Image: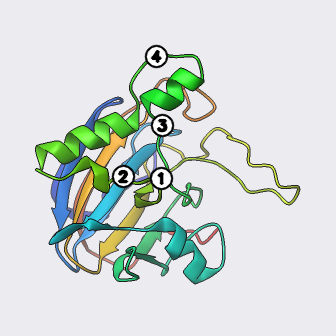
């Protein structure tokens, strides 16, 4: 298992599949999203703390860099092009930066009548007193999801390549609120068995993040 205890953790949350969590980051604070067991997708949305209707906008963020994925040093912008987050570490290198989430509607379309990450995210927002209508597909990042964009125009869903202990780390550039959900969709979205995600607020102890820039 990859050693992800290279920082001082201020707060650590273990989130089980089908469940959610939420938190707040001040400017300069860092959030590490850890795939504890490997091949597990996490959905996480970010909103400006003082104006939750200003959400992170992944489409604008991708347009700003001119590619389908973000790398170390790239910025996640809000819908008003305010810098909200910077990617500062990534030991996996494969995530879905397009945005979106599973939902009861999508699951019904696929033949299963069960709730999805959208319902979990909306529930977490309601607990914080936030309007669930602020949640949009482009506000929601999907760490560890593997959706390659191929030259022939195809967009297949493949099993995640993340290993146990892989992580994505983001630094807040403005005060933000986040809500997250551990996805329960079957393979190839997730591997089996479904496993928890760990979310840490961290303080760096060194510059060695074991990063990749794929």
On the image, numbered disc 2 is attached to which residue? Answer: 44
Seen at 52% across and 21% down, the residue is 108
Q: Secondary structure at mark 4?
A: loop
The answer for how far apart the CA atoms under marks 3 and 1 are is 14 Å
On the image, numbered disc 1 is attached to which residue? Answer: 143
Q: Is residue 138 left or right of residue 52?
A: right
Q: Secondary structure at mark 3?
A: loop
Q: Is residue 179 left or right of residue 95?
A: left
On the image, numbered disc 4 is attached to which residue? Answer: 113
Q: Are marks 4 and 3 in contact (CB under 8 Å)?
A: no
Q: Are marks 1 and 2 in contact (CB under 8 Å)?
A: yes
Give the mark toward the camera: 2 or 3.
Answer: 3
Quadrant of residue 158 within the rendered picture: top right
Q: Which of the labelled discs sits on residue 179, or is there none?
A: none
Residue 6 against residue 87 in the figure, above or below? above
Seen at 54% across and 33% down, the residue is 190
Seen at 44% across and 70% down, the residue is 89
Residue 87: image location, x then y, percent: 43, 73
Which comes before the other along the chain, label 4 or label 1?
A: 4
Give the mark toward the camera: 4 or 1.
Answer: 4
Give the mark toward the camera: 1 or 2.
Answer: 2
């Amino acid at each position: 298992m990859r050693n992800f205890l290279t920082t001082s953790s201020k707060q650590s949350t273990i989130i089980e599949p089908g469940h959610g969590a939420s938190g707040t980051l001040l400017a300069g604070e860092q959030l590490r999203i850890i795939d504890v067991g490997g091949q597990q997708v996490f959905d996480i949305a970010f909103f400006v703390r003082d104006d939750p209707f200003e959400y992170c906008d992944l489409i604008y963020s991708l347009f700003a860099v001119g590619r389908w994925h973000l790398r170390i040093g790239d910025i996640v912008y809000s819908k008003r092009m305010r810098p909200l987050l910077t990617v500062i570490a990534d030991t996996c290198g494969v995530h879905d930066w397009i945005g979106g989430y599973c939902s009861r509607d999508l699951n019904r379309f696929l033949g299963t009548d069960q709730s999805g990450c959208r319902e979990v995210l909306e529930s977490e927002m309601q607990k914080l007193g936030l309007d669930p209508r602020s949640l949009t597909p482009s506000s929601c990042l999907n760490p560890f999801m593997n959706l390659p964009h191929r030259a022939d125009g195809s967009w297949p869903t493949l099993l995640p390549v993340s290993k146990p202990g892989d992580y994505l780390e983001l630094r807040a550039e403005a005060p933000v609120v986040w809500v997250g959900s551990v996805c329960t969709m079957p393979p190839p979205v997730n591997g089996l068995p479904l496993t928890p995600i760990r979310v840490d607020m961290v303080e760096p102890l060194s510059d060695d993040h074991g990063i990749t820039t794929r």
